[in-house]
Amino acid sequence: MGELYYYMWEFVTSVSIIVLVAAYILHDRLRIRYETLDDTEKSLKMDRLNQATRMTLGCLFFLGGLGWILFMQTHTIYISPELEGFHNLVPAIAMSGIGILLAGGGVRKYLSTGNSNEKTQRR
């Protein structure tokens, strides 16, 4: 059972690092590309990029946390049953909570600026 615990943590940390590095590289490349635009278009595109990044990472965190909870509920990963308990789910619940906050913040920002962006594009 101890091996499954090790491999689970190795998988979770590896995938998390890969996703965060890929998101950083993509965000940085797009931000550099937007530097050549004029100020109004640059501001609009940067806002959209930030919103999309928040919503995407938030959804990934939320789904990752749910997957982690599901895995913990369907597999026994500890050497002894005495080590199992609710505290095992706390990191996954925290990860899902952070995902909800990130995605919710991105959606709220999208909805609050979505109407103003439509007005500026119509002019």
Image (cartoon, rainbow, N blue to C red):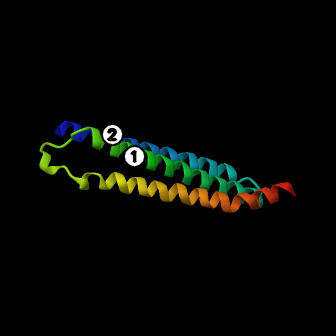
Q: Residue at x 22, y 37 (%)?
A: 4
Residue neighbourhood size for the residue with mark 2, other residues' Cα within 10 Å, grouped as few (<14), some (14–19), many (≥20) = few
Rendered-image quadrant of the N terminus: top left
Q: Which residue is mark 2?
A: 11
Q: Is residue 114 above or below residue 7?
A: below
Identify which residue is drawn at 74% across, 59% down: 115
- For this rendering, which residue is in front, 52 or 59? 59
Judged by depth in the image, the label closer to the viewer, 1 or 2, is 1
* Front position in the image: 86 or 94: 86
Q: Picture coordinates of residue 80 (x, y %)?
A: 12, 44
* Quarter containing the C terminus: bottom right
Residue 2 x, y percent position in the rendering: 17, 40
Q: Is residue 100 left or right of residue 82?
A: right
Q: Residue at x 53, y 54 (%)?
A: 103
Residue 108 or 16: which is nearer the viewer? 108
- The amino acid pointed to by label 1 is Leu
Q: Which residue is mark 1?
A: 66
- Mark with earlier residue (1, 2): 2
Percent coordinates x, y for residue 83 in the rendering: 15, 50
What residue lies at 44% left-to-right and 57% top-to-bottom? 98
Q: In the picture, residue 63 is in which quadrant?
A: top left
Which mark identifies residue 48? none
Left or right for 59, reference 35: left
Name the element at disc 1.
Answer: helix
- Compute the Cα span from label 1 to label 2: 15 Å
Q: Amino acid at mark 2?
A: Phe
